[in-house]
Image: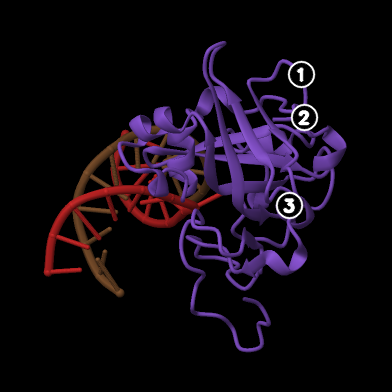
Chain colours: A purple, B red, C brown
Amino acid sequence: MQEKILPRKFYAKDPAIVAQKLLGAYLVHKVSKKLTLIGKIVETEAYLHKDDLASHSFKGETKRNKSMFKDAGHAYVYTLRQYSLVNVVTDRIGIAGAVLIRAIEPVQGIEVMKKLRKTEEFNIGNGPGKLCQAMMINMSLDGIDITVKNSPLYIVKGKESVKAKNIGISSRIGISKSQDLQLRFWIKENEHVSKHPKLTRKKGANNI
DNA sequence: CGTAAGATTCACT
DNA sequence: GTGAATCTTACGA
């Protein structure tokens, strides 16, 4: 595994761009000296700064979403009910865009992940709350810089870039607002995506 | 202070 | 497909 940590400039772009470029990259969590968990990112969603009612940043900075307003290349972890969800902050300071990591394919530490999830491999990382459980991601990682060398959490580039024709695009999942925005991206024909794309699409949506 | 809603998951019908 | 679990944050009174 190459250890080329993605630099801040990689994240300093539009969330929708970063979301697609993150597909196929590896999410690495150094839990301890002995344990490193790695998952390949197979599904993401972009959340914009403005004009996106579903984004936490829409109503401005709050205690919960303050990490979104940091510079690109930071982690934004928050709790939803009893689960944690992990994002990477994009764009520049003051532009609170982020990319939610929705699904991973287990790469390293699979046995540990199985125990954490109490399930088999196919059910480890196919959901934003699930992958956080599997990779031991929690609120202690909120707001950390994931581009520095000693960061416990970071992302490295994938072995092969995912071609555009192999990227699926759809509405985002689990939100009640701004459902018309096509900001969910996933690697086609990957078994670890969270769920089937929504069937309720607006007429004329030329995706999927 | 009370209440409602939520970027989810799981069990059940 | 539907609904409950479960809990923190946000917001209005």
Amino acid, disc 3: His
**Vertical arrangement, residue A93 with respect to residue A52, above or below:** above
Q: Of the two numbered discs 2 and 1 on the same chain, state the one appearing first in sequence.
A: 2
Residue occupying image coordinates x 73% and y 52%:
A49
Are dots 1 and 3 on a single chain? yes
The span from disc 3 to disc 2 (Cα, nearest Å) is 25 Å
Q: Of the two numbered discs 1 and 3 on the same chain, state the one appearing first in sequence.
A: 3
Are dots 3 and 2 on a single chain? yes
Say left or right for A208 vs B2: right
Residue occupying image coordinates x 75% and y 39%:
A157
Say left or right for A46 vs A130: right
Chain letter for mark 1: A
Give whichever of A92, A3 is nearer the camera.
A3
Q: List the single residue furthest toward the right.
A: A9
Contact flag, marks 2 and 1 (Cβ < 8 Å): yes
Secondary structure under the numbered disc 1 in the rendered image: loop
Amino acid, disc 2: Ile
Circle 3 is placed at which residue position? A49
